[in-house]
């Protein structure tokens, strides 16, 4: 949970802020929203997008494995990216076993069935993680909304009509 702006020493001291000018308080809270909460929200979105990308790659691998199983052929001809979009043609004599990235730079040799089971477990785990990231983003959005409501009260503004409201992100 995020803390409200602190004093110059980094201490959250409510008595120090009680002497401050309301305009200074408003400025502190606006800075807190833009420098802390919105930055945290952006990081959560970027992290969630990266996890979605991993899920996409695993599902692409699943489709490739299923295509190999449907074809029933042990040989495979494919293009391999050497880096910087330089491709070479490769021919695999026995495609019955494949290497699957399991994380932290490690690869494990698996049969097609083992790989499919691993992909199911991994995508389920990653989906649960994206759900948690979505909940985290909702909490941050709620914190932003709460601080904005506090700012509205500090400035003595009336409630914003429903038609003029919009999502934070």
Image: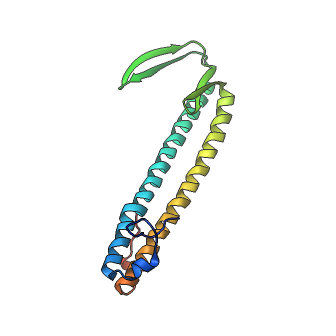
Q: In which quarter of the image is the C terminus?
A: bottom left
- Quarter of the rendering containing residue 102: top right
- Where residue 94 sits in the image (x, y, percent)? 60, 14
**Which residue is depicted at the point 56% across and 33% down?**
104
Q: How many marks?
A: 0
The image quarter in which residue 135 lies:
bottom right
Identify the colour scheme used.
Answer: rainbow
Along the line of sight, the residue nearer the viewer: 118 or 16: 16
- Vertical placement of residue 34 versus 51, above or below: below
Identify the residue at horizontal 52%, vertical 40% (top origin): 54
Give residue 116's position: percent from left, percent from top.
Answer: 65, 33
111 sits left or right of 167 in the view:
right
Q: In this view, does 50 lie above or below 43?
A: above
State whether residue 71 appears in this view: no
Which one is in front, 40 or 78? 40
Q: Which of 126 and 44 is in front in this view?
A: 44
Location of residue 123 in the rendering, given as x and y in whole percent from the top left corner: 60, 42
Q: Decide if residue 21 is in sight here.
A: yes
**Up/down of 1 relative to 67, above or below:** below
Q: Residue at x 66, y 40 (%)?
A: 121
């Amino acid at each position: 949970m995020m803390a409200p702006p602190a004093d110059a020493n980094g201490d959250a001291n409510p008595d120090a802020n009680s002497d401050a000018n309301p305009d200074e308080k408003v400025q502190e809270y606006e800075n807190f929203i833009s420098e802390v909460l919105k930055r945290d929200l952006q990081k959560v979105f970027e992290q969630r997008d990266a996890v979605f990308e991993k899920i996409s790659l695993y599902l692409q691998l699943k489709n490739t494995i299923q295509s190999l199983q449907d074809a029933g052929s042990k040989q495979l001809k494919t293009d391999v990216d050497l880096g910087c979009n330089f491709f070479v043609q490769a021919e695999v004599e026995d495609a019955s076993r494949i290497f699957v990235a399991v994380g932290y730079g490690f690869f494990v040799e698996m049969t097609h069935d083992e790989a499919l089971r691993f992909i199911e477990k991994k995508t389920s785990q990653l989906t649960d993680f994206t759900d948690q990231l979505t909940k985290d983003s909702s909490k941050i959005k709620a914190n932003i909304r709460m601080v904005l409501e506090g700012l509205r009260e500090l400035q003595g503004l009336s409630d914003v009509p429903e038609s003029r409201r919009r999502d934070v992100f």
